[in-house]
Structures are given as structure tokens and as C-alpha cells.
Image (tube, helix red, strand yellow):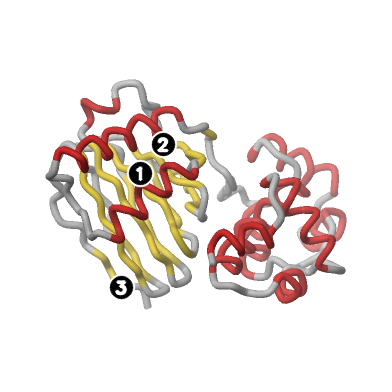
Amino acid sequence: MKHLIQEGERPAPVSFRTESYDAGGMFEMRRQPWCKVGYAVRGVMEAMVEGQRFLCPPHYATWIPADALHCCHNRQNVQFVSVYIERALCADMPETACTLAMSPLVKAILADFAARNVKVPETEADIRLALVLVDQLRQAPRRDTYLPVSEDELLRPIIEALQEVPSDRRSLAEWGRCLNTTERTLSRRFHNVLGISFNEWRQRLKLVASLSMLENDTPVQEIADDLGYSSPSAFIAMFRRQTGLSPTHLSHNNA
């Protein structure tokens, strides 16, 4: 059963919250007069912003503008960072929610604040560091969403099944037979509704799943097996295509 998590009032101009939440946590639906950036250090958080769903895996954050109706929930254990920013500091940020790629510098600043339990910067040094963080977030690469999802009647069964079992290796033609439609129809629907191909969507899903496993020090062999790859090298090749790094490099950096 999901448990509701209430967020207290957050001070301006910048404040931080780093928490670990057990699986099944749900943040209440709300609007806030400040901007928010949500970032999962470990695990994956899901956010719904003005009816659009976002995933917050490690290395990516969700940008939520001021006054946007939103809520979050986590299907698995997650360590999550929220950055609350006064709207005046975000004049050149997007007016709608999007995904931000997190640079090593942004992650390092957030990790420093978390390690020192800084929720509201008070010293001159911490205030300067917080403003550097905001400036870096302004410069972060932006994407509409990393792993788009949809309530489309044809796509939803595929999306939900693969989220539940990422190792499911059914082809789009096999999914077409299961849903009494054609491979061509499903392929067109993925491109038209989600903006990417079925194979690209499935690779991104597997990357999201693998990031959580790597954060928990799961061996690459086990990850490859769990995600349905024929060998660890096949998984490593996918990971390099998607991130430019090998999963072993990421594991070493997290050690």
C-alpha cells in the first residue's frame, strides 16, 4: 500500500531536501510558488507534472516550474534530492516540465550539501555554492523526457509489461499478435505518440533499470541476465551507446 508523503513549506531563495524513501511512497498532488528540481541519487522516482509523466533515474532530473500541478511516487526504494528555487532565479528556465541531464559538478554540489546536512544555505560560501548550482542547472542539457510513456490504448499494455519485466524479449510483431494489431501499426504509434522507435524505447527502459542496479553494486553479469541480454558484452555495448561510458566505469566511480 502506498503511503502519502507530505512536503513542508520550503524557504527561498534556494533550499534542499535529501531523503531515502521506501518503495510505495507517494507525494501529495500540489502546486508550489517556487520551482523544483527532483533528482534520484539511487533508484528511480516517477513524477506526474500537469498530466505528463516523467522518470527521474540517476544522472537525470525533472524540472518542475513554479505553480505546476505535480506529484511523485516511487515503486522501489529510492534516495531522492529535491532542490527548491525561488522563481525569480529561474527566469530563463523552461515554462513547462522537462528532463535535465545532471553534470558531475551538479551532482557533486548536491552530494556536498547532503553530506553536511545543509538544507538552507546560510554562510556566504554556501550561498555562493547554491547560486553556482542554479547557474549549472540553467546550462544543463534539456530533453522533453528521457523515457516517455503514454496512456495510449495500444502502447500502454506494452509499456506496463516491459516496466514490470524489462527482460521480456517479445518483438513488435509478437506484441502486434498479442494485441490483435500489426507490427506496422505499433511501430507508427511509437513514433507518433512517443517520438522514438520501439527498440529505442526498450533500450532506454533497460538503461534506467540498469542504473538502479549499478547504484546497488549489482554485478554486470547479473544485470545482463536480469535484463534479458545474451551476454554481459551485449549489455555493455548498449550501455556505452546510451551513456558514452561502460557500466564498470560507473560502478568504480560509485565505489
Query: Residue 43's spot in the image, x, y percent?
Result: 49, 64
State if disc 3 and disc 1 touch (CB < 8 Å).
no
In the figure, residue 195 lies in which quadrant? top right
Residue at the spot of label 3: 3
Nearest-to-viewer mark from 2 and 1: 1
> Residue 97 has which mark?
2
Point out residue 11 in the picture as x, y percentages from the top left corner: 13, 45
For the N terminus, the image quarter is bottom left
Tell me the CA gap for discs 2 and 1. Answer: 10 Å
**Residue name at image x 21 percent, y 46 percent:** 15
Q: Secondary structure at mark 3?
A: strand
Q: Amino acid at mark 1?
A: Val
Q: For this rendering, which residue is in front, 156 or 215?
A: 215
Classify 10 Å Cα crowding around label 3: few (below 14), some (14-19), many (20 and above): few
**Mark sitting earlier along the chain (2/1):** 1
In the rendered view, tell whether residue 237 sits above or below residue 184: below
Q: Nearer the viewer, residue 41 or 180?
A: 41
Residue 116 sits in quarter: bottom left
SS at badge 2: loop
Q: Which amino acid does the dot numbered 2 rest on?
A: Ala
Q: Residues within 10 Å of mark 2 (few under 14, many from 20)?
A: many
CA gap, disc 2 and disc 3: 25 Å
Q: Which amino acid, by three-letter code, is at mark 3?
A: His
* Quadrant of res 7: bottom left
> Is there a contact, CB below 8 Å, between mark 2 and mark 3?
no
Q: CA distance from mark 1 to mark 3?
A: 22 Å
Horizontal side of residue 106 vs 204, given as left or right = left
- Say which residue label 1 marks: 37
Farthest residue toward the top?
Answer: 92
